[in-house]
Image (cartoon, rainbow, N blue to C red):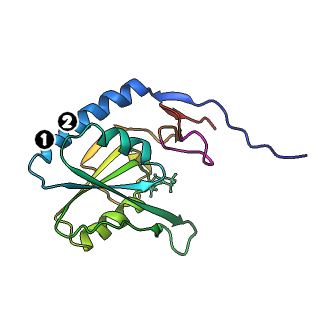
Amino acid sequence: MSQEKVFPEPTVLISSEKIDRRIDELAAQLDRDYADTDGLVCVGVLKGSVFFLVDLLQRVTVPVEIDFFQTSSYGGTTSPGEVRIRKDIEVSIRGRDVLLVEDIVDTGYTLRTILDLLRFRGARSVRLCALLDKAATREVVVPIDYCGFQIDNVFVVGYGLDYDERYRNLTYIGVLEG
Ligand code: PRP
């Protein structure tokens, strides 16, 4: 008998209206904080950050450039938290203001790795903007300069976040039970 995957209806945790309002606030704050920049390099991490990055950057008025990383993390006991860069950014960030835009900070390994790399490459400033902060599962310290929402240790999908590649295009953040 075939074992069909089950994709249940998520429970709404953060509505699209609430996301919208919070992104308005974050964009206004970014405009204030980067009012003097000569251009902000906004870096997303594929694929989860895409929806948030697009909606956020459509609302900021300071000049921006956009580029993307893609990473994969190795589980396992020999190299816990080891993050591999599968796709690197192409823009030069030496002497630039860089804003890393992410959908969620969970263990923190992905963002820690990328933040360290961006600083190593000589960015003038590096800040992190994350839509969701799941602090209960954090394993390494990652300062979040701009945070959308703090969430509990629940499995969230939607607005970029997936379960087995599903649910990314939901307009809200939902919780999958079980
Ligand atoms: C998710 C998320 C972050 C990372 C956070 O990406 O978008 O990049 O995990 O987890 P961490 O804090 O435990 O390192 P994922 O690897 O699931 O890829 P995706 O964005 O393509 O779904």
Q: Is residue 148 visible?
A: no
Q: Is the Cβ of the residue at disc 1 closer than 8 Å to that at disc 2? A: yes
Res. 54 visible in picture: yes
Say left or right for 40 vs 114: left
Bounds of the magenta span? 160-168
Residue 142 lies in magenta, yes or no? no
Q: Is mark 1 within 8 Å of ligand 1?
A: no
- Tell me where residue 115 appears, x and y as whole percent: 31, 63
> Identity of the amino acid at label 1?
Arg
Quarter in which the C terminus is drawn: top right
As drawn, the label of residue 28 is 2
Instruction: Out of 62 and 109, give the one closest to the viewer.
Output: 62
Q: CA distance from mark 1 to mark 2?
A: 6 Å
Q: Amino acid at mark 2?
A: Ala
Could you say whether the residue bearing mark 2 is in a helix, strand or loop? helix
Q: Main secondary structure of the magenta part?
A: loop
The crowd level at tag 2 (other Cα within 10 Å; few <14, some 14-19, many 20+) is some
Q: Position of residue 41 (x, y in %)?
A: 25, 57
> Mark number for residue 68?
none
Residue 150, percent from left and from top: 36, 39
Q: On the picture, is 57 further left or further right than 103?
A: left
Residue appearing at x 36%, y 45% in the figure:
53
Q: Which residue position holds label 1?
A: 32
Q: Is residue 63 left or right of residue 139?
A: left
